[in-house]
Image (cartoon, grey):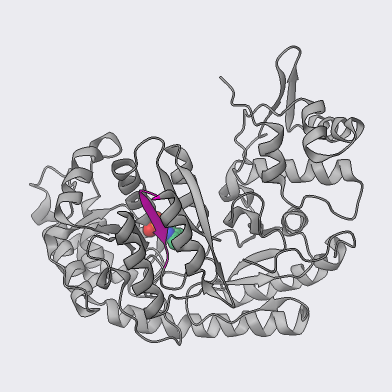
Amino acid sequence: MNSLVTGRRLARELGEWRSAGPAYRALADRIRVLLMDGRLASGTRLPAERELSGALGLSRTTVAAAYSKLRDDGYLASVRGSGSTLVLPGRERGEHSLANGLPLDFTKAITLAYPGMAAAYAAALELLPAYLGHDGFDMVGLPDLREAIAHSYCDRGLPTSADQVMVTTGAQHALNLVTKTLHSPGERVLVEQPTYPHALDTFASVGARILSFPVSQDGGWDLRQASLQLRRAAPSMAFLMPDFHNPTGKSMTIPEREYLAAAAAREGTVLVADETTALLDIDRGVLPPLGCFSPGAITLGSLGKIAWGGLRIGWIRAPREVLTRILRDRPAQDLGTPLLEQLAAAQLVHELPVLADSRGKDLKMRRDVLTGLLAEQLPDWKVDVPDGGLSLWINTGTVSTSALALAARAEGLGLVPGPRFGLDGAFERFLRLPFGHDVEQLRDAVAILARISSRVGADPLRMPLQAVI
Ligand SMILES: Cc1ncc(COP(=O)(O)O)c(C=O)c1O
């Protein structure tokens, strides 16, 4: 059965969809972007033309023309009596395939593999024979690796024992496991706005009611909004990225950590701190993990950014009783983490301070190259230089980044438009631009952006509406 998106919900998702060209084309383009980056699923039934024209305050002719364009371009199928259904032709599903085959994939904030990766795998291969007597279904993680992860928390000032750690196939898997266990139908989840898009996907997949509070370049974490949401809605979980937040690159101050931990404790909300980016420190310095302020917090970690995404090793740090519940639920999702990768990961976790140091230096160079290129070629874009993380969160001022992403794609550059990081179409004028890529790729990407941004253009009808983030 196809799901139906109501006119009101579609109007919310569309956000600021208008651009300088004809309205029907802008509307069709925006619906196409929502489909391609996964905010509307293939198979979703669009509202009747009359309903959408009412919700958007447009003539029915404009909506009909937009639907007709989508149909002509192969994105909409109409069956008499059952309305119009979105279709994703070929391989275009989600932002991952949005860049499929594109020479410049800036849809992911990635790092190049740590130079010691191959050596870690080689050492793992030597160790493997000793594990071949093991049944191979490892649902909690190899003792050595869990021990090494626990030590790394102790080194950061958060006392941890190996039985508070479960190894997973990455932080995304960790978040899915935590969510499936902690979340019950009808409960609310609090997120930062903007936030990590696949966290939104995870919460949507369990039918969570998602609430948000702003994180901005200038103001940091809006604690007043956060505490209001916590008090009003008592969400079961709050998903936070306290260190080098994706996409803004911001880090919570110590008072912000203390405040959020105390506010969540008062309402019984479990803090889930995603630390996937926490060790990507360029020039910030050490801060205590959120878990230091919230004993019940759950922390997600990963080697995906600090070492290599292809390793697919992450973990959950949680109170033992929570891990026991997650372990009970885990077989419904997967039957364990591969051993060879865990053996390689153990080598790398032992060397985490070295990895972090080397990554920090490398990222500094790339961040500075990208900010320099942008200052030269797109001087009107407001770029705050983050002190860590993997990406710039750019306020373009006037450019529709959904339109920019479509135009960039035609030039071989994959981008994720700003609204993918928010709820209800927010951040249309924002762009996340990762800087972990090859320098040559950074150059090519900025050259394309400089060329097409004036073509996509400032929208004379819409002045910047995104001052508050
Ligand atoms: C904040 C955040 N959490 C989780 C992930 C996924 O991490 P992993 O590759 O370990 O699954 C990412 C990757 O982009 C991320 O940025």
Residue ID at (59%, 43%):
38
Image quadrant assignment for residue 162: bottom left
From this viewpoint, is residue 369 visible?
yes
Magenta stretch?
Answer: 234-241
x, y (%) of residue 138?
17, 47
State the residue in front, 203 or 349: 203
Q: Where in the image, quadrant-wise, is ligand 1 located?
A: bottom left
Quadrant where the C terminus is found in the figure: bottom right
Q: Nearer the viewer, residue 372 or 150?
A: 150
Check if residue 240 falls in the magenta segment: yes
Quadrant that contains the N terminus:
top right
Q: Is residue 426 magenta?
A: no
Q: Residue at x 48, y 74 (%)?
A: 389
Which residue occupies 19% across, 43% down?
325
Measuring from the top left, give residue 439's x and y in whole percent.
Answer: 60, 77
Residue 415 seen in this snapshot: no
In the image, what residue occupies the spot 85% across and 65% down? 458
Height in image: 3 above or below 147? Answer: above
